[in-house]
Amino acid sequence: MLQKRLKQYIDETKESEGAVPLFKQEREYALKYGLLDDNEITFPDADSRFQEAYIERCDKETEELISQESRIFLDRPITYLKEQKNEFVFLESVWFTMIGVEAVSLEVDDVFGKYDAMLGLKLQKKYRSQIERYLEESLEGESSYDLLFNGEDGLWDLNFTMNDLRDFNERQSILSAYELIYEFLFNLLQNMEEA
């Protein structure tokens, strides 16, 4: 899963650009599994992962587009979503695609005021117990996730409460929240491969 997708990204990038820009997490993984040599890697700025992301602000009730945003929008504090409870943020990125996620939406739950991440995860149905085990071990709240296999799309609809991630806090930016989600999902896939 993860190894295959990362290898494909590395091969395509090496062919078009020569050196491969990898962030810390992917770099450690690629070196650990011998996917490339250290001298073939470049080091992008730590906060540039979502530089080329497609970002939308949408209305929660109608799902209509409010505004397409630039990368600068991600520098806003995550509390923006509490101030604009009628909105959610939708983000697509090559990095999410690489780990089998189409896009990630972030919003604040109207009832409990918690931050929710919603996404589709491309994994086969047979991985249910491994996914659930990882979620239960990694999230700190009770029943802080919903996991449902969507047979039509062939992916897992996963919603989880950001507040239950160990490193989450309301002082962070929307960008760092997306970084945290990415790290969480990358670790999920890595954990599944190593199990």
Image (cartoon, helix red, strand yellow):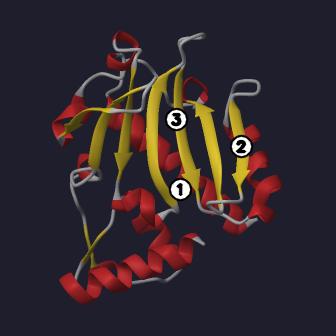
Q: Amino acid at mark 2?
A: Leu
Q: Secondary structure at mark 3?
A: strand
Q: Amino acid at mark 3?
A: Ala
- Identify residue type, mark 1: Phe
Q: Nearer the viewer, mark 1 or mark 3?
A: 3
Q: Position of residue 190 (x, y in %)?
A: 61, 62
- The residues tagged by marks 2 and 3 sit, at their Cα atoms, a distance apart of 12 Å
Count neighbours of disc 3 (C-alpha within 10 A) and say few if under 14, some if 14 to 19, many if 20 or more. Answer: many
Question: Can residue 73 be seen?
Answer: yes
From mark 1 to mark 3, how far is it between C-alphas? 15 Å
Residue nearer the viewer, 55 or 180: 55
- Mark nearer the viewer, 2 or 1: 2
- Residue picked out by circle 2: 147
Q: Position of residue 109 (x, y in %)?
A: 54, 18
Image coordinates for residue 30, horizontal then vertical, percent: 46, 74
Q: Residues under labels 2 and 1: Cα distance?
A: 17 Å
Q: Which residue is drawn at the image coordinates 49% and 68% (left, top)?
A: 29
x, y percentage for residue 90? 38, 40
Q: Earlier in the sequence, mark 1 or mark 3?
A: 3
The answer to which quarter of the image holds residue 24 is bottom left
Instruction: Report which residue position mark 3 lands on.
Output: 117
Where does label 1 land, which residue? 186
Quadrant housing residue 161: top right
Marked residue nearer the N-terminal end (2 or 1): 2
Q: Residues within 10 Å of mark 1 (few under 14, many from 20)?
A: many
Q: Secondary structure at mark 1?
A: helix
Q: Is residue 130 above or below residue 176?
A: below
Residue drawn 70% across and 24% down?
141
Query: Who comes first in sequence, dot 2 or dot 3?
Result: 3
